[in-house]
Image (tube, helix red, strand yellow):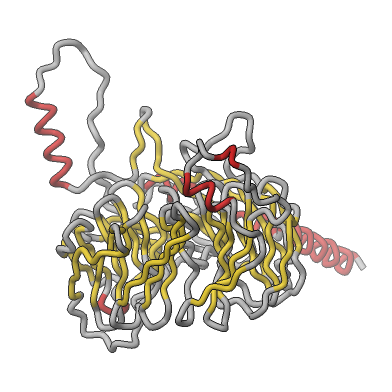
Amino acid sequence: MFQLCKSRIWLWLLILVIIASLPRADAESLYGTAADPFEVGRVGLAREWIIQIPFDSDRYRLSQVDTARWMIIAQSEDGIVHAVRASGGDTAEAGGPLPGTLLWSTPLGLPKAALHSAGIDRDLVTINRDMDAFGIDSRTGSIFWKRRLPSPPSAGSLPVGDWVYVPLWDKTVYRLPVNPYRRPSNSNSEKDTDSKTSSSSKLSLDPVRIKSHGFIEQQPSRFGEGVLWCTDYGRLTVIEPAEEGWERHEFFLHDNPNGPVAVRDKVIFAATEKGELTRFEDATRGLRLTWRFLLETSLHPNMPRPQIMLHNETLLVSLGEEGIAAHNASNGERLWKTSLQGTFLACIGSHLWCYDIMNRITAIRLIDGQEDAWLCPGPFTIPVTNRSSERIILASPRGLLASLRPRVIGSEQSALQPSTSSSKTSNDTKEETPAESPQPSTEKPEAIKVEKPTPQGKDEPFNFFGK
């Protein structure tokens, strides 16, 4: 009898230990990953915030995440749209929500529906869902308007100025007003305002179907005060406001585009399936070809090169199995090429961070293309490309979001360390400058050599020293 009671006591103790350890499983799963503050600090970054998106993660998954300077929009498969405050640097508002704050969650219904990229503006967020387009107030999350589409959408919608552009499957672009409840102004009191702005506001608020002369696979892009889209046969179309109505400019790539185009102000970068990299600029009578460069890859023409990212004057192009190449954005000259294959995440300081095919988050030096640091993604297996700010946005299928920013040391931002050549140049400059008065030490620490992460069991202790 005594042995039976003793065995029951041990059994209950074992059950209690197992139950007590279950809530800690999720927290310990971040140890040694890209969301671990110690691991992130070793590579010159800092975890800015981390948040759990509220949805039924046991039945559904987070599948679409889009970034902007103002907010991050995450769409889960249960039909809910979530908004998280992003860190836009100069866009921070006094007394506003802190970065990483969940602003709102709006259910749109239709679980498991096809998800497109969200169109994010300061005042409006546009979402395509099945045969409907939704306009959501970016401050409150309330549905401002809902419009039935004449055809299924082929890509994400985009709000630009007073209009929303929705690509459709019937090779047209559906233009909707941002505010369908305002009245178009026809008064003569607007003569002192900008002619382009006034001409836009005087147009009818009725939806308009614009012929795109081709199928649009990618979300349109902002082009100055207008909009730009590219068809599957390489027709670039720009629509800009003019003194009277709108102007439409077109340019043919003479080949199918290979992934989305990159736009900065009124400069366009595009790649084709045959391996041509081109740059266009806005001219008086349309688009003007500035330069063209042959990527000289041995890929099959139909193999995708899905990404182009522009950082300052460096144009980064993913070459599929050929790796990643960097070009001078001014003249197209190739700067370097690396065999690393990966999906672009963000550019921070002097490094490009990408999610490579070895399931690692890797930092590449922009000056020479050398791999500099590595992080283990852990549960964050959704690559999120952030072109809006110098932040790495981490996302997991179960709804965990995190932001990594450059580490701040002595009021200076440091994302890793510069390359060896740049460090030596800065040190030589400091030695040549005589110190007239004692100054606080600004000497940069030596470059940290980070080892590649290796698979570890959960029972192994976390290495706080990173060696």
Q: Which residue is drawn at 31% across and 77% down?
A: 252
Q: Which residue lies furthest to the right in this view?
A: 1
Residue 80 horizontal side relative to residue 364, left or right: right
Place of residue 20 in the rendered image (x, y in percent of width and height, measured from the top left): 74, 56
Q: Is residue 107 shown above or below 85?
A: below
Q: Quadrant of residue 170?
A: bottom right
Can residue 32 be seen at all in this image of the molecule?
A: no
Q: Which residue lies furthest to the front in this view?
A: 188
Percent of width and height locating residue 305: 34, 76
Nearer to me, 20 or 402: 402
Q: Would you place residue 272 above or below residue 444 in this image?
A: below
- Tell me if residue 352 comes above or below residue 424 in the rendering: below
**Can residue 77 be seen in the rendering of this structure?**
yes
Query: In the image, 315: left or right of 436?
Result: right
> Which residue occupies the foreground of this view, 212 or 343?
212
How many marks overall? 0
Residue at the limit of the structure toward the top, as seen here: 437
* Closest to the observer, 409 or 184: 184
Residue 193 coordinates in the image, percent (x, y): 51, 39
Q: Where is residue 466 in the image (x, y as percent from the top left)?
A: 37, 50
Which residue lies at the image location 72% right of the left edge and 67% below the top edge?
147
